[in-house]
Image (spheres, grey):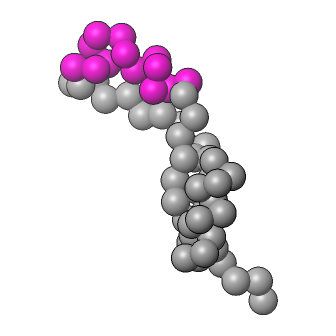
Amino acid sequence: MSLLNAIFRLFGYEWVRDETPYERIEDDPISDEGWDDLYEHSPRYRLRKIQPEQ
């Protein structure tokens, strides 16, 4: 992840860990089969723009 962040910082972005809770969808076939626990416990990341310090 540090290599990706080094590359994306050149363009003003960085990858940060997404701490929002995982939303389960009731009518989703993945939830019906029990695969949603894999998504719930695996780390998720999102791309955000680096804010210049003032």
Dominant SS in magenta: helix
**Hey, which residue is sitting farthest right in the picture?**
54
Q: Quadrant of residue 10?
A: bottom right
Q: Which residue does the image show at 50% across and 26% down from the upper left? A: 40
Residue 4 versus residue 20: which sits nearer the camera? 4
Residue 11 versus residue 16: which sits nearer the camera? 11
Q: Quadrant of the C terminus?
A: bottom right
The relative height of residue 27 versus residue 3 in the rendered view (above or below) is: above
Q: Quadrant of residue 35?
A: top left
The relative height of residue 19 versus residue 6 in the rendered view (above or below) is: above
**Hey, which residue is sitting farthest bottom in the picture?**
54
Q: Position of residue 15 (x, y in %)?
A: 59, 56
Q: Which residue does the image show at 64% across and 54% down from the upper left? A: 3
The relative height of residue 17 versus residue 31 in the rendered view (above or below) is: below
Residue 45 versus residue 36: which sits nearer the camera? 45
In the displayed structure image, the side of residue 26 where residue 46 appears, left or right: right
Q: Quadrant of residue 27?
A: top left
Taking the magenta stretch, the answer to whether it contains residue 32 is yes
Q: Which residues are magenta?
A: 29-41
In the displayed structure image, the side of residue 45 where residue 6 appears, left or right: right
The relative height of residue 15 versus residue 45 in the rendered view (above or below) is: below
Taking the magenta stretch, the answer to whether it contains residue 36 is yes
Q: Position of residue 47 (x, y in %)?
A: 52, 60
Q: Position of residue 16 (x, y in %)?
A: 62, 54
